[in-house]
């Protein structure tokens, strides 16, 4: 029996939306439909696919406000919902421009003068995407757009916490004849995602380490590629020479406005500027307000789920119990059935605390001092995760040199959380932050393609390694 899933509105606290996961048989039928559509989608060539994606983009612009309002209902955030759509539209432009050159087949000579090599790029037939609740539109489409242009069909399962946006998205998709046969979104929770893995040829997942392990195991059983991004506890290192005002603003944005996506969760500051920096961060934190009671009342949106509110509170209480000092914020507030947390600056923290070692996904900024760069690197690398980091220093060269010693895939220099905004830089998640290739840069495109090699003999002579066979008389 299929159990409907009630969805809570993070701004009102009311369960005002319901999704109904598809039965396994219906999901399988959807996937078969997409597989049939993929044949024609591949045959129209990259120019035909670009035309369909550009039509998609124009249709989104026409329905911009409807999509934005749906995202606001999903996340409770105004500014980041607008930013999310704009980045999504830019991604369509970028991949439409890059796709033709990335799909070019190559022919070349080999080390053997009588054998030439020709290579063909063939798309995976059906790509599955399971995406998280933060940046729901962007997380759902960051892989979908290059996969579609590569010639794949795509099926997306957004988070059950933020499903409202894809109703509007599907309305747009269903009006585009070529696209509706190869792109769809499905409702559902973890059970639906588990079934989906057995219906597709490649899976992209972004979410928790615990669920990511299960995705990897099921993908291995089905012998399909899995590309996983499993989060991180991103560190920031602030050297004595850093522009402290710039560093405080960047970290505040990353930790507060960008929470849950490429966000700074641990801050390490040189002893000589430690006190000045955390006082500056406190001052800037007080300038931000909660977007309550109205969405335009402030910049900080609500916590999206009760479970996340409990995690934030648990981590804060653990830190306080172990000696952390709270300078601002410091608790989750419940207001009319919704949860909110003001920017929280903590000092006197250490790595025995959950807040320094586990993902919190809240506007929390714990700060430690360091006496040497070596100490800062040891602290920053003391994590099972290796997703992103940030380094602030007057010398770009020094910052890059230090960054080379960090066990993470992407490092923002004199900024923070740039991978949420700019997707050009290829990088691999390290340690338990992920599995598979980069979700950024041109190499993303190639992961949706399988390479075939044609080894072509170009003369009529016997190959020198053949047996000495005499022609029969």
Image (cartoon, rainbow, N blue to C red):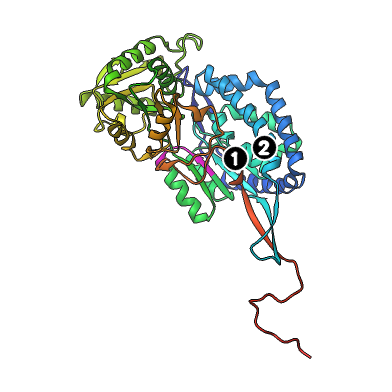
Q: Residues within 10 Å of mark 1 (few under 14, many from 20)?
A: some
Nearer to the camera, 375 or 36? 375
Mark 2 = which residue? 98
Q: Where is residue 349 shown, x and y percent of the image?
A: 25, 26
- From the viewer's perspective, is 419 left or right of 383? right
- 303 left or right, relative to 382: right
Q: Is residue 209 magenta?
A: yes
> Residue drawn at (72%, 25%), measured in percent from left and top?
58
Q: Secondary structure at mark 2?
A: helix
- Contact check, label 2 and label 1, Cβ < 8 Å: yes
Quick one: which residue is furthest to the right in this view? 473
Residue, x 66% and y 59% (percent of image)? 453
Q: Earlier in the sequence, mark 2 or mark 1?
A: 2
Question: Disc 2 and disc 1: Cα gap in Å?
Answer: 8 Å
Give the magenta-colored segment's residue range: 204-210
Pinpoint residue 253: horizontal percent, then vertical percent: 44, 20
Q: Which image quarter: residue 175?
A: top right
Residue placed under numbered mark 1 in the picture:
442
Locate the C terminus by quadrant. bottom right
Estimate the x, y position of residue 27 in percent, counting from the top left.
Answer: 60, 44
- Report the side of 15 relative to 461 (left or right): left
Q: Work out whether residue 260 can be spotted.
A: no
Q: Residue furthest bottom?
A: 473
Q: Toward the viewer: 423 or 166?
A: 423
Residue depicted at 31% across the width and 13% down the height: 279
* Residue 81, magenta (yes or no): no
Classed neighbour count for the residue bearing mark 2: other residues with Cα under 10 Å, few (<14), some (14–19), many (≥20): some
Q: With 44 as the anchor, is 422 left or right in this view?
A: left
Q: Residue at x 47, y 17 (%)?
A: 12
């Amino acid at each position: 029996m299929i159990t409907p899933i009630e969805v809570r509105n993070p701004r009102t606290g009311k369960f005002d939306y319901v999704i109904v996961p598809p039965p396994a048989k219906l999901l399988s039928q959807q996937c078969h439909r997409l597989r049939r559509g993929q044949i024609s989608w591949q045959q129209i060539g990259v120019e035909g696919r670009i035309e369909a994606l550009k039509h998609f983009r124009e249709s989104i612009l026409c329905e911009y406000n409807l999509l934005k309002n749906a995202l606001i209902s999903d996340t409770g955030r105004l500014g980041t919902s607008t930013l999310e759509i704009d980045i999504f539209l830019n991604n369509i432009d970028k991949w439409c421009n890059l796709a033709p050159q990335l799909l070019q087949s190559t022919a070349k000579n080999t080390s053997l003068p009588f054998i030439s090599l020709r290579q063909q790029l063939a798309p995976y037939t059906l790509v599955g995407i399971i995406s998280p609740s933060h940046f729901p539109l962007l997380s759902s489409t960051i892989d979908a757009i290059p996969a579609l242009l590569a010639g794949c069909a795509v099926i997306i399962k957004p988070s059950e916490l933020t499903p409202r946006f894809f109703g509007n998205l599907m309305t747009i998709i269903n009006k585009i004849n070529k696209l509706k046969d190869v792109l769809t979104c499905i409702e559902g929770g973890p059970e639906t995602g588990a079934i989906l893995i057995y219906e597709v040829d490649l899976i992209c997942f972004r979410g928790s380490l615990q669920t990511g392990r299960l995705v990897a195991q099921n993908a291995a059983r089905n012998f399909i590629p899995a590309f996983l991004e499993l989060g991180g506890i991103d560190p920031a290192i602030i050297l004595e020479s850093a522009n402290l005002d710039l560093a405080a603003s960047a970290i505040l944005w990353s930790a507060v406005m960008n929470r849950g996506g490429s966000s700074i969760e641990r801050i390490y500051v040189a002893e000589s500027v430690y006190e000045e920096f955390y006082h500056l961060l406190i001052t800037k934190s007080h300038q931000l307000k909660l977007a309550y009671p109205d969405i335009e009342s402030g910049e900080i949106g609500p916590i999206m789920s009760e479970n996340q509110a409990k995690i934030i509170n648990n981590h804060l209480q653990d830190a306080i119990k172990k000696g952390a000092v709270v300078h601002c914020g410091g608790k989750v507030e419940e207001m009319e059935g919704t949860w909110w947390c003001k920017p929280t600056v903590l000092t006197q923290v250490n790595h025995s605390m959950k807040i320094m070692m586990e993902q919190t996904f809240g506007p929390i900024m714990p700060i430690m001092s360091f006496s040497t760069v070596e100490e800062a690197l040891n602290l920053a690398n003391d994590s099972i995760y290796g997703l992103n980091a940030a380094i602030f220093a007057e010398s770009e060269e020094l910052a890059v040199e230090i960054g080379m010693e960090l066990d993470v895939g992407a490092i923002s220099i004199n900024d923070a959380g740039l991978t949420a905004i700019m997707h050009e830089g290829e990088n691999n998640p390290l340690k338990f932050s992920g599995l598979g290739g980069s979700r950024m840069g041109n190499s993303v495109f190639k992961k949706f393609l399988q390479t075939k090699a044609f080894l072509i003999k170009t003369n009529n002579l016997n190959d020198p390694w053949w047996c000495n066979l005499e022609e029969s008389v």
